[in-house]
Amino acid sequence: MYTKLEEAKEILKKYNQEQLLNSYDKLNEENKEKLLNQILNIDFDLISKLYENTKKEIKLEDANIEPISYIDKEKLSKEEYEKYEKIGRKVIEDGHYAIVTMAGGQGTRLGHKAPKGTFNIGEGIEKSLFEALSDTIKEANIEYNVEIPWYIMTSRENNNQTVEFFENHNYFGFNKKNVVFFKQGELPMVDTNGKILIDENGMVKEAADGHGGVFESMVKNNIIDDMKNRKIEWIFIAGVDNILAKMIDPIATGLAISKGVLATGKSVVKRNPEEKVGVFCKKNGRPYVIEYTEIDKKMAEEVDENGELLYGESHIITNLFNIKAIENLSKDKLPYHSAFKKAKYINEKGELVNPSEPNAFKFEAFIFDAFERLEDMAILRVKREEEFAPVKNAEGLDSPETARKLYLNYMQCKNKNNIQYQDVAKVIVQKEDINNINNVIYSNEFKVTINNIENLQKENKIKIKQIEPKVAAKNVTDKDKK
C-alpha cells in the first residue's frame, strides 16, 4: 500500500513536476503533510492544458454578436417602477434574499498590506470598504425589517485577517450568525516552462482562481446548503471594492422575476467608445460580456437611432442570481484565463527569487463567463454616480480619490432626501422623538415607514402625535423623490 509520499512521487514523475518535493526534507511534519495534500489534490491534467493554452494565440471564435436589450432604471415609468419594486420588496421582506461579497484580494495596488476590504477609504469618510458596505446592509435591514445574511468570500491568504477584522469591529453590529465567511479556490502558478512554482514556505505556489470561481466555492464550502436552510432564493454577488454597490435591490429582483429569468446584471453606460471595459451583448442568442479587446473600432462606435452606443452597457460585476442558477453554474468549471504576473518563488538551489519582471502564469475564471450558460438574463442600466464607485488603483481613475468624491456626492443627495422625510415625520410624531426614527425613514414606501413607526411606538420608543390617512396611504418611491 502506497504512502502519501510514494503516491506523490509517482504523480510528480508522471507530470515532470518532481521539483515540488525539493524542500520536503526541510519541512516539519505538519507542513510535510500539508504539502503532500496539496500535491495529491492538484488536477495536473488541467494545469498542463492551461499551460499549453498560454502558447496559443487567442482567436475569436466565429460567433454571432449582437446588442442586448436592457432596462434603463432611470427611464422606468412610475407604474413600472412600483410593479418591480413591489415584487422585489416581497422577496426581501420574506427573508428570501442574501448577499455575497467577493473579498479574496489584498490591497497591494492601493499600498495596503492587508485584505482589500479593510482598506480605509480616507478623508471625509474614514471607513473601511467593509464598513461602507455594512452600512448599506444595515439600512436595508431596518427598511425591510429583516436580517439579510451576508456571505463573504475570502481567500487562503486573507481569511484569518478578514475574520479578525470583523471580530475587532464587533461584526459592525450584525448578528454573528448572519455573517458567513468562506474561502475561494486556488490554482497552482507555473513558470514559462510549465513548472509549478514553490513558494517561500516550501509549499505549492497557488493563486486565487478568480471571481468566476465563486459558484464552485459556494458549493464546496456548503454555502448553497446554508442558503437553502435559510430559504434564500435570490443572491446578489459583487466585489468588495465598489462602495456604492446597491446590494439590496428590489427593482433588479422584481425585474428578473417579471421577465422569468434567473439573473439580472447591472450596467453603466460606457464613458466613451474607447473605454477599456467589457460590455453586455448577445452571443449566438445568449447573454455574454465581450471584452474590449474583442471589439473593433467600428463596433465600439456603432450607435442606435437615439445616438446611444449599441455596445455601451459596461459590466460592473454587480449581479443578482437565483439560487437555481448558481447550482447549475457550479456543476461545470468556467473557462480559465491566464495572466502573466510577478511571483516570488524558491528556485532549484533553495534560494528565494523576487523577480522584477513578470515570470509566472496564474489562471482565473471570470464571473461573466457564466452568463452564456444562462438562456437569458435581465440587464438593468443604473447611474454610475449612484451605484458604481470602484476602488482599484492607488491614483487616477477608479482610485480612493475618485471613489470618495462619488460616495460623498451620493450621500449628500441622499441626506437631502432624508431631510424631506424627517420634515414629514415631525408632523406625525412627537418632535422630541425625531432622533429615534432617523434610521427608519429611508423607506421607499411611506406606508411601510408608518408601520415601522407604529412598531416603535409599541416598544415605547416614540409617541405618535398624528397620522393623516391621506399621508399614510401615499406611496413615496424613488420616482417621487426625483
Image: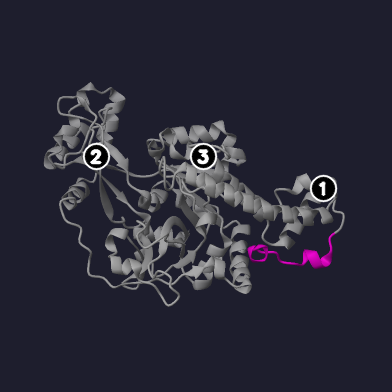
Tell me which amino acid carries mark 2: Leu
**Front position in the image: 343 or 48:** 343
Q: Earlier in the sequence, mark 3 or mark 2?
A: 2
The quadrant in which residue 348 appears is top left
Mark on residue 40?
2
- Relative to 420, say whether 165 is above or below: above
* Mark 3 vs mark 1: in front: 3
Q: Residues within 10 Å of mark 3 (few under 14, many from 20)?
A: many
The segment highlighted magenta reads 467-482
Q: Is residue 480 magenta?
A: yes
- In the image, residue 43 lies at what x, y percent? 23, 46
The x, y position of residue 346, in whole percent, is 21, 29
User: Which residue is pictured at 40% across the width and 69% down the height?
Assistant: 309
Q: Earlier in the sequence, mark 2 or mark 1?
A: 2
* 3 or 1: tag closer to the N-terminus: 3
**Does the segment drawn in magenta span residue 174?**
no
Q: How far is mark 3 from mark 2, CA to CA? A: 41 Å
Element marked by disc 2 = helix
Q: Between 206 and 416, which is closer to the camera in this rendering?
A: 416
The image's mark for residue 121 is 3
Residue at x 84% of width, y 48% of height? 431
Q: Is any atom of residue 167 visible in this view? A: yes
Q: Which residue is mark 1?
A: 462
Near-viewer residue (399 or 184)? 399
Task: Tell me the quadrant of the picture where the C terminus can be found.
Answer: bottom right
Inspect the image, locate mark 1, and give the three-letter code of the amino acid beneath it.
Ile
Task: Pinpoint residue 106: horizontal percent, then vertical percent.
Answer: 40, 38
Q: Is residue 394 left or right of residue 249?
A: left
Say what secondary structure mark 1 lies in: loop
Q: Is residue 9 left or right of residue 269?
A: left
**Residue sitting farthest toward the bottom:** 305
Q: Nearer the viewer, mark 2 or mark 1?
A: 1
